[in-house]
């Protein structure tokens, strides 16, 4: 994949996640939860998408370590990029580290 592919996938992921958020009923009992998951290890498709959504929608990242206690924290910084601190609540899973298949 080239740079344009990463940019296009990131743009599409941002649109898809925004639409999903807009469809959740915030006045429901739980307020609504969305699990955002990709089959990519690309920062552009993961942390950058969540960081963007935190800026354009009234949402928050919540911890789920009580239910899922493995994986590594999402990046709050990567190279020159800086992301919202709450992205540390997200998780990255690597097949070669966590003895699981990619999806």
Image (cartoon, rainbow, N blue to C red):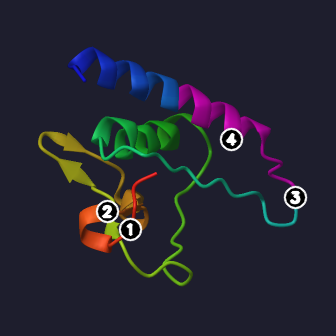
User: Which range of residues does the magenta coloring cover?
Assistant: 14-27
Secondary structure, mark 4, is helix
- Residue at 51% over, 30% down: 14
Residue 57 picture location, percent across and down:
60, 39
- Residue at 51% over, 50% down: 37
Mark 3 Cα-neighbour bin, 10 Å: few <14, some 14–19, many ≥20: few
Q: Do the residues labelled 1 and 3 touch (CB within 8 Å)?
A: no
Disc sitting over residue 100 in the figure = 1
Q: Are marks 1 and 4 in contact (CB under 8 Å)?
A: no
Mark 1 Cα-neighbour bin, 10 Å: few <14, some 14–19, many ≥20: few
Mark 4 Cα-neighbour bin, 10 Å: few <14, some 14–19, many ≥20: some
Secondary structure, mark 2, is helix
Whichever of callouts 1 and 3 sits on the residue coming sooner in the sequence is: 3
From the viewer's perspective, is 41 left or right of 34? left
Q: Are marks 2 and 3 in contact (CB under 8 Å)?
A: no
Residue of label 4: 21
Nearer-the-camera pick, 46 or 29 = 46
Whichever of callouts 2 and 3 sits on the residue coming sooner in the sequence is: 3
Mark 2 Cα-neighbour bin, 10 Å: few <14, some 14–19, many ≥20: few
- Residue at 52% over, 59% down: 61
Whichever of callouts 1 and 4 sits on the residue coming sooner in the sequence is: 4
In the image, residue 59 lies in the stretch drawn in magenta: no
**What is the spatial separation of the Cα atoms under label 3 and label 4, in whole angstroms?**
13 Å
Residue of label 3: 28
Residue 42 picture location, percent across and down:
29, 41
């Amino acid at each position: 994949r080239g740079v344009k592919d990463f940019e296009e996938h990131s743009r599409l992921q941002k649109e898809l996640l925004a639409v999903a958020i807009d469809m959740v009923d915030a006045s429901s009992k739980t307020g609504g939860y969305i699990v955002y998951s990709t089959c990519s290890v690309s920062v552009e498709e993961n942390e950058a998408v969540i960081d963007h959504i935190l800026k354009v929608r009234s949402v928050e990242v919540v911890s789920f370590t009580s239910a899922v206690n493995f994986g590594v924290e999402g990046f709050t910084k990567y190279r020159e990029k800086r992301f919202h601190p709450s992205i540390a609540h997200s998780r990255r899973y690597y097949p070669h580290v966590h003895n699981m298949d990619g999806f």
